[in-house]
Image (cartoon, helix red, strand yellow):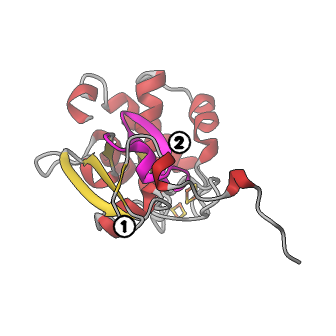
């Protein structure tokens, strides 16, 4: 059975995307972002998702794709300081933005306090969900503070799915990581 897509489901025309500049002739758009502190510019198909831009254009494969339907959270990155599911964002629509991925957290060879807490508390098994978990966890701390109770962590992590751990150690890791981030949040982001 075929379903005709609504007009609103169609990929946006290059010229209609905010910010991005259409390249004459080839249907591509020029997009400039700051990724993990480095300014990057690329000519891309206007339908390119932010997660594709990160993984395929920038070759930063720590950001994962688990569902493509905005449910699993494996693709979470920070965009202008807030957590977003990068499978739901068109790269061209965030032209000029600042992106932080899991690769951008460690500084001078030292893990971010939240990464360290996941390691210490064994907050992972296969690790597929882990980059998204950590990026979401840091966002939770940025919004809710460094003293997090279990109920808050479980509620705030509803958008991140783990198929391995049963969440117990993840919750413990997030709470410990939050406590560890006291006084280091500015330096970390
Ligand atoms: Fe983005 Fe699952 S890949 S939410
Ligand atoms: Fe395997 Fe979470 S550790 S999906």
Is residue 184 left or right of 75 when viewed as pictured? left
Residue at point 46%, 39% (across, down): 83
Residue at point 49%, 43% (across, down): 84
Residue 53 placed where, x, y %? 38, 61
Is residue 41 left or right of 170 when viewed as pictured? left
What's the mark number on residue 25? 1
Q: Residue furthest bottom?
A: 1
Of pointers 2 and 1, the one earlier in the residue sequence: 1
The quadrant in which residue 135 appears is top left
Dot 1: element = loop
Residue 43 placed where, x, y %? 31, 62
Residue 47 placed where, x, y %? 50, 61
Count residues near mark 1 (Cα–Cα under 10 Å), then give few for <14, some for 14-19, many for 20+: few
Residue at point 58%, 41% (across, down): 157
Region rendered in magenta: 78-96
Q: In this view of the protein, which residue sits in the foreground, 120 or 39?
A: 39
Check residue 150 for magenta coloring: no
Q: In this view of the protein, which residue sits in the foreground, 153 or 103?
A: 103
C-alpha separation, residue under disc 2 versus residue under disc 1: 51 Å
Residue at point 31%, 30% (across, down): 181
Q: Residue furthest front?
A: 25
Residue carrying label 2: 171
Residue 123 visible: no
- Above or below, 152 relative to 1: above
- Above or below, 36 relative to 130: above
Check residue 79 for magenta coloring: yes
- Above or below, 93 relative to 146: below
């Amino acid at each position: 059975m075929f379903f005709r897509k609504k007009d609103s489901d169609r990929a946006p025309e290059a010229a209609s995307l905010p910010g991005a500049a259409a390249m004459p002739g080839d249907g591509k758009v020029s997009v400039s972002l700051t990724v993990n502190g480095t300014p990057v510019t690329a000519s891309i198909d206007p339908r390119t998702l932010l997660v594709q831009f990160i993984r395929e254009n920038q070759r930063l494969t720590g950001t994962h794709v688990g569902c493509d339907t905005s449910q699993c959270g494996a693709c979470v990155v920070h965009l202008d300081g807030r957590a977003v599911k990068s499978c739901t964002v068109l790269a061209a629509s965030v032209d000029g933005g600042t992106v932080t991925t899991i690769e951008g957290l460690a500084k001078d060879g030292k893990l971010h306090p939240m990464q360290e807490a996941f390691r210490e508390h064994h907050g992972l098994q296969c690790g597929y969900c882990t980059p998204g978990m950590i990026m979401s966890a840091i966002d939770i701390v940025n919004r809710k503070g460094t003293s997090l109770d279990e109920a808050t962590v479980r509620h705030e992590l509803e958008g991140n799915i783990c198929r391995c751990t049963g969440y117990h150690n993840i919750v413990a890791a997030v709470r410990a990581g939050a406590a560890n981030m006291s006084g280091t949040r500015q330096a970390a982001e």
